[in-house]
Image (cartoon, rainbow, N blue to C red):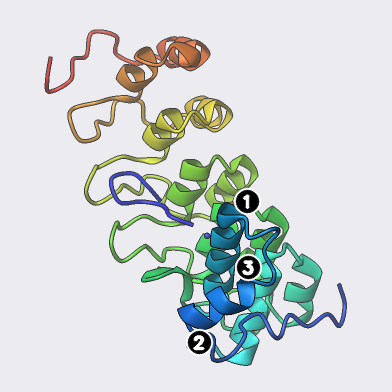
Amino acid sequence: MQTQGADQAPGDGVSYDGERPPGDSDSDLVDSLMFESNGFDKDAMDDAIEERKQHMLNKHLTKMEKEIYLSIKYGDSNKLRDMGGAEQCDLNFNIEIEKNLFYQPIQLASAIGEAECLKVILENNQTNIDVVDAKTGTNAFWIACFYGRGECVGLLANAGIDIFNKHSDTNSNGLHVAIERKHYEVATMLISSKYPLEEKKKGGLTPLLLSARDKEAYYVSEQLVKKGAYINVVSDSG
């Protein structure tokens, strides 16, 4: 799961133990998967190798943390709650989504759109809702906008997260990325909630300038104008 960069933003009693096969090296993976791939289909084998490598991440997690991570990954909100996710459980730990990319549980649930798990996480008074990505400075609200997770956007806003959070490099906020990523429902939701309409991201681009250059975003542009967005704005490049 790759997010950011330049706006580039990963039942009861069930155990998810065994996610990572111990001791696998790349050569071991290739050797074993030669027998697992369908007719030595290279694409299928490459996909399987990548999936197996994913299982080798998060060696730093405790058993409890790994169970929490997997309950969110697989959308098992009941298991998350049963483990104390809404109460005493510490949910402020780093999960390695891919090599050197870390999210905390609140960010992961927001990124993949697991709203029921997010509800549990937000019930936990120990959850740090203001945690941000170390490289980009983006929080769970920005991430939810980036991935078009409308229900998560609403839950986080109601929980009091910083909805004006911006990417540290591009200066984009939730509305900018929702428009750029063609998540028009999320963009419309933000516009109707009195979200700031004149903020500029890198290059002097306002939400209206972004939507105006996207022929599929006509309705978003219309809503921006109706809500009073300044129509005579120009970007830094003119």
Q: Which residue is mark 3?
A: 121
Q: Residue at x 78, y 75 (%)?
A: 79
Work out whether residue 85 or residue 25 is closer to the camera in this orientation and state it: 25
First along the sequence among labels 1 and 3? 1
Helix, strand or loop at disc 3? Answer: helix
What x and y, as percent, mark residue 218? Answer: 48, 10
Disc nearest the viewer among 1 and 2: 2
Q: Residue furthest front?
A: 39
Local crowd at mark 3 within 10 Å, few (<14), some, or many (≥20)? many
Work out whether residue 116 or residue 3 is closer to the camera in this orientation and state it: 3
Label 1 and label 2: CA atoms lie apart by 25 Å
Task: Tell me if residue 13 comes above or below residue 33 in the rendering.
Answer: below
First along the sequence among labels 3 and 2? 2
Q: Which residue is mark 2?
A: 59
Whether residue 69 is visible to the viewer of this picture, yes or no, is: no
Helix, strand or loop at disc 1? Answer: loop
